[in-house]
Amino acid sequence: MTLLETALTRDAGIRIPIIGGPMYPCSNPELVAAVSDAGGLGVLQPVSLTFVHGYDFRDGIRHIRSLTPSPVGMNALIEGTNRSYRRRMEGWIDTALEEGVRFFVTSLGKPRWVVDRVHGAGGRVYHDVTERKWALKAAESGVDGLIAVNRRAGGHPGPLTPEALLEELADLGLPVVCAGGVGRAEEFVDALRMGYAGVQMGTRFIATPECSASDAYKAAILDAGAQDIVWSDRVTGVPVALINTPYVQAMGTEAGPLARRLLRGRRTKHWMRSLYALRSLWTLRRSSYSMGGHREYWQAGRSVDGIKKVEPVAEIIARFGNRALGDAGTTPRPHDD
């Protein structure tokens, strides 16, 4: 048995335990398909597929499937802002199951209803978590695995290092995938040696020709180091990891006092989250595809440290897989942040 044979590869039916993290707005169909075709698991993000890239949802899945015969997954953000969103997500999941998708990554909320639907079709569900308390809720819901989002991640990072988060989750008896801080092949090997069942990568796959994000965004990832990543709650109302551009510096990284109070209020927090969600759809879509580099919110994680060039998805995944086969006896290095 090699480092590449894990619970994730068995559950997802893939060769290399790498998930292409679902990203709004950067998960274009060609990127999703390329990750799967190279032996990992590309995961489609339904709002990106429909709102950003303009596909009817079913047609978008069929387009991805036309680009690769390999399995693909779907992201289901299940804590919707209203009932109509919940109904839409239910429809998307049912459609994905009808089109042969059998691996789902759920985010936010309690995923029991997704688990019941997906297990009924013979599929698997892994749930995003940042702390043990959320992992316990996911385990109670019957998920098949956990995506452990650490403090090095892009998107919405968690508070813990990869090592500390795995320690919190290791006794739950579920496969755990490392999400955050993996941009180099040696970091992939470190995560597997540490006990993770695989990794989820987002930032690394933005800097590829298959990703349709702007060249300015990709260049910013190549130029940035880990110290250039800051957390801002001005985009979605909760911390988002961004490259610290002059525009981010000018805008600041903290929501105003009124917004913070409304986000904490029992009666107002859901309304405020809905407002932020709608605003972020436009902000992040515009910034990710614009060439105006001085006025941009560019999402990225601390894995930017190891990303030095734009290169094809297949080359990245092949290099990571070969390194895992060659370094099976290495000892993982601890992260210092």
Image (tube, rainbow, N blue to C red):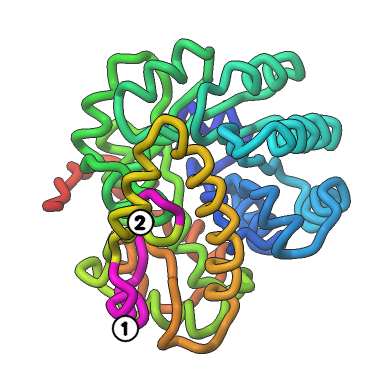
Q: Amino acid at mark 1?
A: Pro
Residue 77: tell me if it is visible.
Answer: yes
Q: Amino acid at mark 2?
A: Asp
Q: CA distance from mark 1 to mark 2?
A: 17 Å
**Location of residue 245 with respect to 116 vertically, above or below:** below
Image position of 291 (left or right of 244): right
**SS label for mark 2:** loop
Q: Which residues are magenta?
A: 236-252
Quadrant hosting residue 38: bottom right
Q: Which residue lies under the disc numbered 2?
A: 233
Camera-side residue of 62 and 189:
62
Q: Residues within 10 Å of mark 1 (few under 14, many from 20)?
A: some
Is 244 colored magenta in this rendering?
yes
Image position of 290 (left or right of 92): left
- Residue drawn at x 78%, y 47% as measured from the top left: 69
Camera-side residue of 2 and 260:
260
Quadrant hosting residue 101: top right
Q: Which residue lies under the disc numbered 1?
A: 246
**SS label for mark 1:** helix
Quadrant assignment for the N terminus: top left
| Precedes in sequence: disc 1 or disc 2 | 2
Picture coordinates of residue 66, whole percent (x, y): 84, 54
As drawn, the label of residue 318 is none
Do labels 1 and 2 touch, CB within 8 Å? no
Quadrant hosting residue 121: top right
Number of marks in the image? 2
- Residue drawn at x 29%, y 48% as measured from the top left: 327
- Residue drawn at x 30%, y 30% as measured from the top left: 131
